[in-house]
Image (cartoon, rainbow, N blue to C red):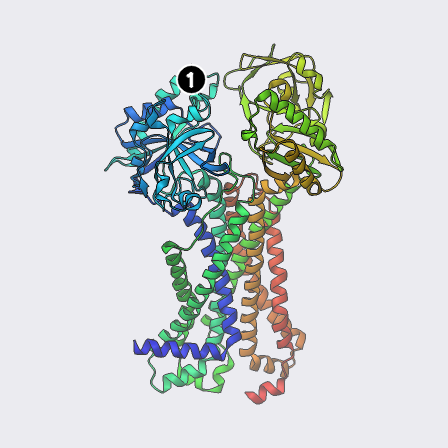
């Protein structure tokens, strides 16, 4: 311990003697370690942190997936009851339906996050109440008085009721349905999806009462199970797949969907919660983690190069200490102590950078289009925990060892006699020079891979920002209302919406106003099967068709071209049902023939006359192939959307306040839920791609800068050690240009070795990136060529100053020193 304290004090003195060197090393490490810790903290929160429940490792999520679609968990009540009653591998199974409710408890109604859950929900999780009691099987009986109850989350109880014990037993209104609060969930438990804090849980039996019967009868339930002791997830999946086939066959008997029989079943670990966020953000985060790991390797090899140069400069000091009796192991330990201390300081600074960086990343990640089914206030709770601290401490020790081993070995293997002689400054051993150049070559290789990845992601972002989406991006204001508390039926709501459209169009600067659902790039809307007279489809080719319910002037407002036929008219409401189809729908069902005047029938029910053909527009994702779409007149079909769209001649933000005032003047009880612009929606839809592109560009630039610093340090050190050699060469007739070319050629050899190592690494990394993100040009050679050219230019600039210094060596000064 005494020796360790002496080593620490000596290391601190050395750091004080070279503050610039120490600052550069600590900042380099802080950036590399901070970036790693920031990304890891998100991965830890989303993928590793377990739920605060009993034995979370036994929890599993039941998933059903259509071919080619993202994983989903949408089961019917019948499927839930069948799995619950016939399986032998689960000790309990719970059904969950997520929703948003208007809750009133003696104050203004508030929109809250909630879940309708089966009576087995809290027993499956093994939770104990913070106050009162939680649900049980008694609450599963539909229509019983015992089911008209609710459980509040601890955070909502604290925020709205200030932890008042009398809340248990109080009456509340949930969507105008009276319920009795029977308990409060434990404080740590906030829900099953990271980023969503649930406020209230209601028995599943009350869902038809609060909303309307049949809302989730055909699907919409998430299923959560707990494995029995000793049962593996593989065994449970094998048995539940057998039950799943029975459920699929029963569903196929009453479903017109031919793809039902192709549904697949999967059992996924749910100890960290449901998989929806992990599926959406997991791969991009892993890609960023790979990039920051490369960046940390660049930083470590860079610092190792700097420390080797510093150790060489201290060779005389080390030789004196060895001559005076210092042990070589003690000297090596001293060097390692200095490296670990610098790494520790870099780790502390990295933690601060990580916290700020992680919070910034969260804000960027959740600023985009929300995940379907998640509330708009979705947030990822990132805060340091034991895993994060252990991770940061681990990489601090690892990096300290990595970049401290080389100087420590140099101290261990030093020969005092040659070092004490002035002639010992003439140069380094061939092995030492090879090791230093290898470190720089590795930096160049890693930096080329980072720059190539940055070029790949940046070119992908440029492609997304210039795609033709089928509608105008600018001068569109989007406004969504919440009519739940209006008290109007469907007929009165339609009349009020017409009046509101008239008022909105009268606002100065508004060219037209309409409404529609869904809004482009806001997620999938309604999908149904259709039939067209004279057009037969095989069951394998049959697909759902998207439906949009829009008002007149929708296409002109959105900038979607009408290719033929006409738009909807106010007089259509009293006539026969009409529809407008998009180009993809027209070409698939009618080919080159005109569809105007022909009919499309929905699920064997109502038929619509086609009166127009519109251009294709993207509604779910910027990269999707525009789906076959049928547009219906919202006022004719009695399903009017609260999504209002205003086309403006001035920046749309300037009319937002007046639009809000028009809503308030018409309705006092209908709030404006959110206001946005279409350009904001488009930007938000690619926020993750932009985040990865910007971060990869920053990581690539930082890696290239570190590699340039490493190359400069190596060449500057080499020039300083070879001053005598350059002096002799110039005394014997070598020109200053020849000496400069010698240094440049030496640098180019190192760079060429790095490029040779970096090219296959970059190609491999690009192929991996292509698996992470859709439509990446992973096979294009342009990102690699651009990255190599950029690295070559940066390296030549870094080599210029040492080469220029070598060319200006004074032969007489060098020989006199010799």
Image location of residue 727, percent across then percent down: 60, 82
In this view, 731 is above or below 507:
below
Foreground residue among 526 and 796: 526
Q: Is residue 608 left or right of residue 239?
A: right
Query: Would you call the spot at circle 1 few (<14 residues within 10 Å), some (14-19), or many (20 or more)?
Result: some
Find residue 257 and report its horizontal and vertical position in percent. Answer: 48, 19
Instruction: Report whether residue 276 is seen.
Output: yes
Image quadrant holding the C terminus, namely: bottom right
Query: Residue 315 location in percent, x, y?
Result: 45, 80
Q: Secondary structure at mark 1?
A: helix
| Viewer-closest of 722 and 183 | 183
Residue furthest out toward the left: 230
Q: Which residue is mark 1?
A: 252
Answer with left or right where residue 314 lies relative to residue 61: right
Splitting the image into 4 quarters, where does residue 699 fall?
bottom right
The vertical placement of 752 against 332, above or below, is above
Q: Residue furthest bottom?
A: 816
| Number of numbered tags placed on the structure image | 1
Q: Residue at x 59, y 42 (%)?
A: 684
Q: Which quadrant holds the N terminus?
A: bottom left
In-image side of 646 versus 359 (left or right): right
Question: Can residue 241 be seen by looking at this rendering?
Answer: no
Residue found 57% across the figure and 24% down from its top:
488
* Vertical side of 564 occupied by 322: above or below: below
Query: Where's residue 191, x and y in %?
Result: 40, 40
């Amino acid at each position: 311990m005494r020796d360790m304290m002496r080593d620490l004090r000596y290391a601190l003195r050395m750091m004080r003697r070279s503050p610039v060197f120490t600052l550069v090393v600590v900042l380099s490490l802080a950036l590399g370690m901070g970036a790693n810790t920031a990304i890891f903290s998100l991965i830890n929160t989303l993928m590793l942190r377990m739920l605060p429940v009993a034995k979370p490792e036994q929890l599993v999520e039941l998933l059903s997936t259509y071919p080619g679609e993202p994983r989903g968990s949408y089961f019917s009540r019948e499927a839930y009851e069948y799995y619950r009653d016939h399986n032998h591998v689960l000790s309990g199974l719970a059904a969950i339906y997520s929703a948003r409710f208007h809750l009133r408890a003696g104050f203004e109604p508030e929109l809250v996050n909630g879940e309708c859950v089966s009576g087995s929900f809290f027993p499956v999780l093994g939770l104990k109440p913070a106050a009162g009691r939680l649900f049980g099987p008694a609450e599963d009986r539909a229509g019983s008085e015992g089911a008209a109850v609710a459980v509040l989350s601890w955070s909502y109880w604290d925020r709205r009721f200030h932890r008042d014990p009398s809340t248990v037993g109080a009456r509340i209104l949930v969507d105008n349905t009276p319920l009795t609060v029977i308990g409060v969930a434990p404080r740590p438990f906030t829900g099953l999806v990271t980023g969503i804090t649930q406020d209230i849980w209601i028995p599943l039996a009350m869902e038809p009462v609060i909303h309307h019967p049949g809302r989730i009868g055909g699907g919409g339930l998430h299923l959560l199970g707990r494995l029995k002791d000793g049962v593996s997830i593989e065994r449970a999946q094998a048995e539940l797949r057998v039950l799943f086939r029975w459920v699929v066959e029963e569903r196929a008997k009453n479903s017109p969907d031919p793809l039902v029989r192709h549904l697949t079943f999967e059992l996924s670990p749910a100890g960290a919660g449901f998989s929806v966020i992990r599926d959406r953000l997991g791969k991009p985060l892993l890609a960023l983690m790979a990039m920051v790991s490369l960046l940390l390797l660049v930083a470590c090899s860079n610092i190792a190069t700097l420390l080797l140069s510093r150790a060489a400069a201290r060779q005389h000091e080390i030789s004196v200490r060895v001559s005076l009796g210092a042990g070589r192991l003690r000297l090596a330990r001293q060097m390692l102590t200095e490296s670990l201390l610098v790494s520790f300081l870099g780790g502390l600074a990295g933690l601060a950078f990580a916290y700020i960086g992680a919070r910034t990343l969260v804000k960027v990640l959740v600023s985009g289009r929300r995940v379907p089914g998640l509330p708009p206030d979705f947030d990822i709770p990132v805060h340091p925990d034991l895993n994060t601290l252990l991770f940061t401490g681990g990489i601090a020790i690892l990096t300290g060892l990595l970049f401290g081993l080389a100087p420590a070995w140099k101290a261990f293997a030093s020969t005092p006699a040659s070092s004490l002689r002035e002639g010992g400054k003439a140069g380094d051993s061939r092995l030492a020079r090879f090791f230093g150049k290898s470190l720089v070559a590795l930096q160049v290789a890693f930096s080329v891979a980072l720059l190539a990845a940055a070029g790949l992601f940046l070119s992908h972002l440029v492609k997304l920002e210039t795609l033709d989406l089928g509608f105008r991006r600018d001068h569109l204001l989007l406004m969504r209302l919440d009519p739940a508390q209006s008290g109007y039926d469907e007929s009165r709501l339609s009349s009020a919406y017409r009046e509101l459209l008239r008022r909105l169009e009268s606002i100065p600067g508004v060219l037209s106003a309409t409404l529609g659902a869904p809004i482009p790039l806001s997620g999938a809307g309604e999908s149904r099967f259709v039939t067209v007279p004279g057009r037969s489809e095989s069951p394998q080719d049959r697909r759902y068709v998207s439906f949009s319910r829009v008002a007149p002037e929708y296409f002109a407002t959105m900038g979607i071209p009408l290719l033929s036929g006409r738009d909807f008219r106010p007089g259509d409401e009293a006539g026969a049902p009409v529809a407008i189809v998009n180009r993809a729908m027209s070409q698939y069902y009618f080919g080159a023939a005109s569809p105007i005047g022909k009919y499309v029938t929905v699920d064997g029910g109502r038929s619509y006359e086609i009166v127009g053909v519109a251009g294709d527009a993207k509604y779910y994702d910027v990269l999707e192939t525009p789906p076959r779409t049928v547009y219906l007149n919202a006022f004719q079909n009695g399903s009017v959307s609260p999504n209002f769209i205003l086309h403006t001649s001035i920046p749309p933000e300037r009319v937002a306040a007046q639009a809000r005032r028009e809503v308030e003047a018409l309705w006092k009880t209908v709030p404006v839920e959110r206001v946005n612009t279409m350009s904001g929606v488009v930007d938000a839809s690619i926020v993750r791609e932009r985040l990865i592109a910007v971060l990869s560009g920053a990581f690539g630039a930082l890696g290239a800068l570190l590699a340039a610093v490493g190359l400069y340090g190596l060449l500057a050190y080499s020039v300083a050690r070879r001053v005598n050699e350059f002096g002799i060469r110039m005394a014997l007739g070598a020109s200053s240009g020849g000496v400069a070319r010698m240094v440049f050629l030496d640098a180019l050899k190192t760079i060429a070795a790095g490029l040779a190592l970096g090219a296959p690494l970059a190609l491999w990394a690009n192929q991996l990136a292509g698996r992470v993100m859709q439509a990446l040009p992973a096979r294009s050679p342009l990102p690699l060529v651009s990255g190599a050219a950029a690295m070559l230019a940066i390296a030549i600039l870094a080599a210029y100053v040492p080469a220029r210094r070598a060319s200006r060596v004074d032969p007489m000064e060098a020989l006199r020193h010799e």
